[in-house]
Amino acid sequence: MEIILVVTGSIAAYKAADIARRLMDEGLKVRVAMTDSAEKFVTPLTFEALTGAPVFRSCFPLPGEEPMGHITFSRGAKLALVAPATANFIGKLANGIADDNVSTMLMASSLPLMVAPAMNSKMYNHPAVIQNIATLKQRGAIFIGPAEGELACGDVGEGKLEDVGVITSRVIKELELKRDLRGLKIIVTAGGTREPIDPVRFIGNRSSGKMGIAIAKAALMRGAEVSLIAGALEVDPPEGMEIVKAETAEKMLEQVSARFDSADALIMSAAVGDYHATHVSTEKVGKKEEWDIKLVKNRDIILEMSRRRRGQALVGFAAETSDIEKRGREKLLRKNMDMIVINDVSRPDIGFGSDENEITIITRKGETRKTSKMAKSDIAEIILDCIARLVTDGKTVSGRKVAK
């Protein structure tokens, strides 16, 4: 889940770096936008180093930057937090003034708005500021603070930026971040496996790992202890969890197996290869008209785990091109899974490599749920909602006790 952190020109701007860090510690992705005045107090480089993402600084992009940034920057975010918010910037928001990159960006979005004011107490109690705050509240903006205390000018009174911990907690509460997986150990596999045939060539698939990464991130945010077993990825894995690389199907089986007994759930979202070569050349094979490669079937990871589980919830994925529900249901029962997520990979607009997906979920109880086309981050939340129900009261739908 992403939020926009807007930093304006207050002496408290340096505290925004701590806000960004704490929000990221909660599993949120933070993108920062800064006014020109904010850059007088803290550099964009600080936020870029913290968040790993470029700061939105201008409506006029430099060469190589995305055009129409004031329109595109906020896409995908769930909320905008202005912290610290100056009297001037609050006035802009209240009166529809869009004369810089940040005010223009916020006017072009429909994001829920949270505002943490920071200013001298006399400014905060000025009739114009009081009216502007009232206007924004009437439009649905949520204000956090300000606190009372010693101000930068030496005065004591209301106007101090609210405590960073309080701001972070209010944002988390507003987003209604679910913590229904707190205490659970979840294994998530992601990406595609690669089976070598010589030192430079391999048999692989088109999986980007985006769906698995989205699930791992969402599970982490919902309180789970996540172990990510990753094949080949086109996206960076998130921080805050155990990350283990496993290039081949056999390596992935080894890593999953080593963690399975202490896990509560296994989510097999990786695209694991079905076959591997019986012979892998130790030297690069030169070009030739024909190359006969004998393949043998890989062991099925989720089937292997289903045979030894003591109640762990098992969630599998299937990539199908036709009869997806029928084939998915057959796999669900044959592999003794609790739930299967089916992708229709015949469509080029969803599935492998795409940022969006459209899935069918079938549970062991016979429940079927189809989603519309949506972002993989949203798909991940739907999948985890189903998994949370699997482990309600410490049991899977098969009735077995979840390993704790």
Image (cartoon, rainbow, N blue to C red):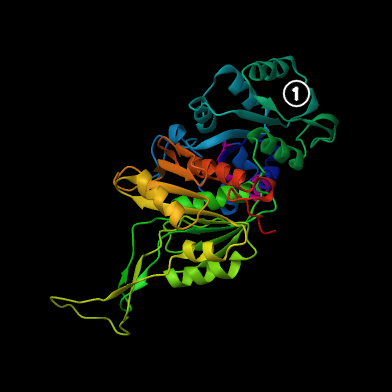
Q: Position of residue 170 (x, y in %)?
A: 71, 35
- Point out the stretch of residues depicted in magenta: 20-36
User: Is residue 35 inside the magenta stretch?
Assistant: yes
Which of the 4 image quadrants contains residue 146? top right
Residue for point 62% across, 41% down? 40
Residue type indicated by callout 1: Met
Say left or right for 320 vs 311.
left
Q: Is residue 48 visible?
A: no
Which of the 4 image quadrants contains residue 12? top right
Return the residue at label 1.
123
Relative to 147, does residue 353 appear above or below in the rendering?
Answer: below
Relative to 158, does residue 279 appear above or below in the rendering?
Answer: below
Residue for point 52% across, 40% down? 382
User: Is residue 32 inside the magenta stretch?
Assistant: yes
Q: Position of residue 85 (x, y in %)?
A: 67, 31
Q: Nearer the viewer, residue 340 or 235?
A: 340
Name the element at disc 1: helix
Say left or right for 142 vs 289.
right
